[in-house]
Amino acid sequence: MQTVTAILENYRNARYRFYRSRTQVGTLNKLLLALGMAILTGLMAQLRISLPWSPVPITAQTFAVLLAGVLLGHTWGGISMAIYIVLGVSGVPWFTGWASGFAHLAGPTGGYIWGFILAALFIGYMADRYVRARSFTSMFVLMLLANFVLIFGPGLAQLYLWLNLVKGSAIDLPGLLYMGMLPFIAGDVTKAAFAAMLGTALMPKEPYNNESDADKWQNRRLR
């Protein structure tokens, strides 16, 4: 039992040191971490299920997006998603279906991709700023909010514009939701749950960067 306890304590100390030093490492190291999350996002984009009634496929990308905020914080989490977009537009074939180029970003799924930056910024900010955001329940709720508001919001807006301006297909709100949101709810809730579990395990439950609720939560250790 003491061995298990020691292992757990070493792990808690290691994750605290990582997050405590994360903002102090050099820019090159931060860029490499951000590039790593961009690569993961690109790989997750290839895990897809096409839907016959929608130009938007089901992918695993949002799992990587949410983790980017957890691992890198709001600034570099957002930068990692910006790297994913910029390199994808520049020719790196890691958009869904091994695609690249601006046409993909301007297409029916482009709004969701723009939302990746917002989601990573939001999750990173909340997780870094508030200790209480690192419990599973809080993180799960925050990830659902990031997913269904910050990703689906611009995603549905661009899908609507694409259908009307490019395809010339008028669509009402129920039809838009059926095409661009409803088929993804179950999968995205599941991805958010797994990301929240992993985020809860990875993030320290002690203050490490002058969190707003550090005094209130300093005696509460959410293992």
Image (spheres, rainbow, N blue to C red):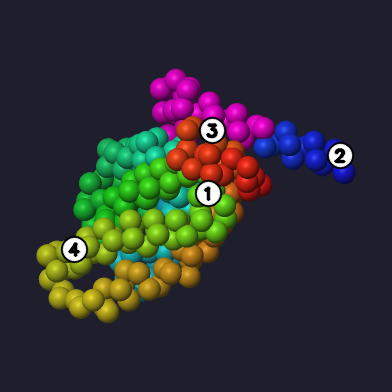
Q: Label 4 near label 3: C-beta < 8 Å?
A: no
- The disc label shown at residue 2, or none: 2
Tell me if 96 is positioned left or right of 186 in this view.
left
Q: Secondary structure at mark 4?
A: helix
Please state, as top left, top right, bottom left or bottom right, where the N terminus lies in the image.
top right
Label 3, label 4: how far apart the Cα atoms are:
44 Å
Mark 1, mark 4: which one is toward the viewer?
A: 1
Residue 181 percent across, percent down from the top left: 35, 69
Q: Residue at x 32, y 76 (%)?
A: 178
Which residue in the rendered view is the most extreme toward the front?
216
User: Type of residue at label 2?
Assistant: Gln
Q: Amino acid at mark 3?
A: Tyr
At 53% from the left and 44% from the top, the residue drawn is 216
Residue 15: % across, % down: 62, 35
What count of labels does the image hold? 4
Q: Give the extent of the magenta segment.
A: 13-42
Q: Can you say whether 108 is above or below 132 in the image?
A: below
Disc 1 residue type (three-letter): Arg
Estimate the spatial distance between the alpha carbons at disc 2 and disc 4, rounded to whole Å: 60 Å
**Lower sequence index among marks 2 and 4:** 2
